[in-house]
Amino acid sequence: MHRHFKINKPYATLSQFTHRHAKRRNKRMLGEFYDFPAGTMAIGRLDEHSEGLLLLTTDGRVSERVRSAKLDKEYYVRVLGTLTPQTLARLSAGVDISLSGKPYRTKPCLVKSLPDPPEFSFPPRRVHRPNHGPATWLSIVLREGKNRQIRRMLATVGHPVIRLVRVRIGAVRLGTLAAGEVEELAERDFSRT
């Protein structure tokens, strides 16, 4: 019987269970937040400075299905500056980024400005000060997930990321989970993704 979970991955936490590098020994790991069963794996990753929804499972087939390009992954992203409609359209159509030193064109996605800042049950790790200039909240929905893709996309158009929170994968939402909180998902909840 496989088990499935969602966690609100906190800022400065690695999306893994064991230390693979000597220089990362002081980093927080997923296993610190819950007594996960043996064989639990993170489905995809969130980089160390990103927060939010991360799915975990003991079933490799489920992991493969969720990581596929068939499921939407939605992120709320706070960026420096105000994005023009032309910049939003450019991001939505796909932009050229570099992955491991090789050029890559991102697939079309949905990008829109949020009229109001989203409310989270966990505070930001860093506070954006008004004297740093205006900031904008975006909703970005992808069907791919390349390494640091959103950060690279926004850097390409000149709007550095201040905060990045994944809020949805398929039908599974982050909801009101506090940072580091884990919720076990029933098979039927997980199968909707």
Image (cartoon, rainbow, N blue to C red):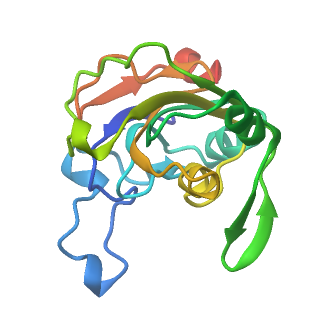
Q: Residue at 64% across / 57% down in the picture?
A: 156
Residue placed most toward the observer, 68 or 10: 10
Q: Residue at 20% across / 44% down in the picture?
A: 125
Residue placed most toward the observer, 9 or 109: 109
Residue at the extreme bottom: 22
Q: Is residue 12 above or below residue 126?
A: below
Residue 193 appears at what percent x and percent y? 64, 24
Residue placed most toward the observer, 85 or 1: 85
In this rendering, would 32 be left or right of 91?
left
Q: What count of labels does the image hold?
A: 0
Residue placed most toward the observer, 79 or 55: 79
In this rendering, would 189 be left or right of 51?
right
Q: Residue at 54% across / 16% down in the picture?
A: 189
Q: Is residue 143 visible?
A: no
Q: Is residue 149 visible?
A: yes
Residue 179 appears at what percent x and percent y? 23, 35
In this rendering, would 19 be left or right of 152?
left
Q: Is residue 118 above or below residue 137?
A: above
